[in-house]
Image (cartoon, rainbow, N blue to C red):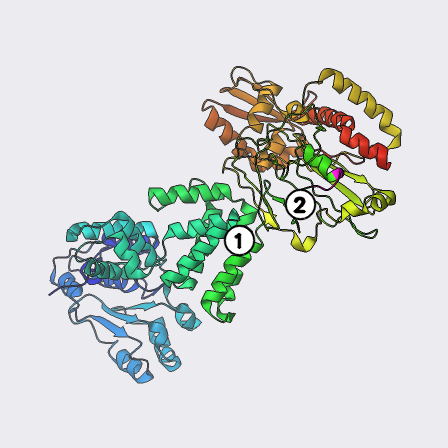
Amino acid sequence: MYQVLARKYRPRNFNELVGQNHVSRALTSALERGRLHHAYLFTGTRGVGKTTIARILAKCLNCETGVTSTPCEVCPTCKAVNEGRFIDLIEIDAASRTKVEDTRELLDNVPYAPTQGRFKVYLIDEVHMLSTHSFNALLKTLEEPPEHVKFLFATTDPQKLPITVISRCLQFTLRPLAVDEITVHLTDVLQKEQIQAEQDAIWQIAESAQGSLRDALSLTDQAIAYGQGAIQHQDVKDMLGLIDHTIIYDLIAAIHQNQKQRVSELLMQFRHQALDVSLVLDQLISTLHELALLQYLPDLSLKYSAEINKKIMQLSQMISAQDLQLYYQVSCKGRADLQLAVTQEQGFEMCVLRLLAFRPLQANEILVSATQQVQQQAPQVNVQAVVHNVQQHVIDEYSAEESLLETPVAVTQQNIEPSSDDFLDEPILDVIETNVTDVTLTENSDQIIFDPASEDALFDLDESNDDVNIVADDEPNSDDFLFDEIAPLNLDVETTITEQLIENDSAVVEDDLFLSQEQMPIESVQPSINSKAELIDEPVPALEQSNIQQHKAAVEVVSNQNSNLMPQDILRLTPQQLEGEWTIEKWEYWFRNSALTPAVQELAQQGVMTGQIDGESLFQIPPKYEQLLNQLQHTLEQALKNEWPNTHFQVKYAEVEATTPYSMQNERKEKAYARASELLHAESAVKDIVQNFDGELQNIQLK
């Protein structure tokens, strides 16, 4: 007769026990030293070995070779225990004998000596099911039983036991088994059974068992029957109704990258497959938890296939830690609200849409203004036509006297293609050559969509190329006039327009484009996973009247030295050969082009590195950064050793008298600012606006 795997492969000694080493070690030591307690309490979830350990202990106590931790398995007592017919092992199901009368009947037989073995062992399973009167009747005997009696209790719910019972027992809490432990055991069992099985299928069964070895063996029996004698991964997924991990990873990636069409396709796929959305949401939350762990424990061994391992590692590198925490919190809140929704499908889909709606803007993402109308032809010569002729996208807002520019227009760092050729023939920027290719104006659309994959982009999203964005703005309450992306400086010029301009050009204003916060969509520009974009947010102080002369002098100096350089060229680091001795230039070039996090790079620029590359290296940094460096030193040291294995990294906390990368970067920024200001002031379009409309440039910023 066929015997199920859970019974056929039940461990018969402590050596065969899977997991629970803390329990087997304590019991083995007690048996070998003869320090035996009279009552043991085994707690834990289902299928982790409570009853099995109790039977092994009963066999160890009664083996005819003596009390031992390694029963012989051949004597009549051992065979009788294995076959469930040992008369002095009294197994009681407390769930079916809860009355106090049953307990009294049991206690009446306690004083009598064992019939066959050395000890009379009472194994009470699910002991928490006993009534209060039964526990009270058991207390006295449990505290001082005869020497030949041992009590073994097993329960899945120890909280229901009276504290008076627990205090009279040695309690052992059995933990749920790890997926690795169950996988190894299932592999061994299937080899003995000579059944072919895919490793991914075994892992899936082990994970679905949720720490219960009995559940895992039962699922294995079911999978063998379902697969007609073999265990296939796809069969296991179909049998258990599981969700493919790849779909969850694709959903997270699509949400993070703002791919609304892809999210829509995945939601429709969930509908068509009629999946249990609560399980899908559980898997989503578990995946977010695993991604967060991988960011802090990158060496965490993954238990998936090579393809899934690659995807999850890419995701952990793509999504920042704070974004993961936000996604996790929103998903958990959605899981709690799932029962409040009209249907679970509705609750799940709203949770996904909430993740998409509240996803943070990434460093490489910007707002794109909505437009009510795209004019294909400009009427007369006006400012809009001028800026279009500079080969830039212009969105100007004119309105009545009380109207203001409500929302700043942010534009992607890409090249622009004008929507019409009917503009002025005279170019505004003769100095700058641009390649205009990458803007698509969608017909009857209120969005301007930029192609992030274009090879003709004005700027590379790279830390070594500090892009320049110059903004000159006026008083906040004046009517605003906006220029976007004057090539390739990416110039945003906001200047004051007097009421005279509004009166003279009122006819032109009506055809211009308007902005409103309600029509302001978010459009995502997605780079590759390893792209790094550094955004310099700190504004350069406004040019006050007192330092105008100083600024003009700086402009003249920079103009003489860097007359042919653009601001981004000034900010770009000179490539270095990373060998030999460390220099300040080599140190800065290495860490700014490394994969270090911004926090580590921020610390690295405050100090200097001396010594040999791929050898003895000494990093000197002021003492005020000691606490921060203590937390991040391992990351910096590991990055150096990954690049140069022979590196011996040391830290010295002392004030740095030499030039630091931080000061060098500030010097480059000042030069780039002066050069950008020079180009901006020399631009004919700006000159015309300043002269004709009494405008002035203020608060120029580098971005």
Q: Residue 150, image x and y in percent?
A: 28, 68
Q: Residue 229, image x and y in percent?
A: 16, 56
Q: Quadrant of the C terminus?
A: top right
Residue drawn at x 27%, y 56% is 236
Q: How many marks?
A: 2
Query: Label 1 to label 2, Cα distance in Å?
Result: 40 Å
Task: Give the residue type that dot 2 points to.
Answer: Gln
Q: Residue 416, image x and y in percent?
A: 61, 36
Taking the image as shown, residue 3 lies to the left or right of residue 345, namely left
Task: Give the residue type that dot 1 points to.
Answer: Tyr
Residue drawn at x 23%, y 72% is 90
Quarter of the image holding residue 127? bottom left
* Front position among marks 1 and 2: 2
Between discs 1 and 2, the one toward the N terminus: 1
Circle 2 residues within 10 Å: few <14, some 14–19, many ≥20 = few
Q: Does dot 2 land on a helix, a strand or a loop?
A: loop
Q: Quadrant of the N terminus?
A: bottom left
Quick one: 25 or 314, which is closer to the camera? 314
Residue drawn at x 82%, y 25% is 551
Q: Which residue is mark 2?
A: 375
Q: Which residues are magenta?
A: 378-383
Quick one: 42 or 65, which is closer to the camera? 42
Q: Which residue is mark 1?
A: 327
Q: Main secondary structure of the magenta part?
A: loop
Quarter of the image holding residue 394? top right
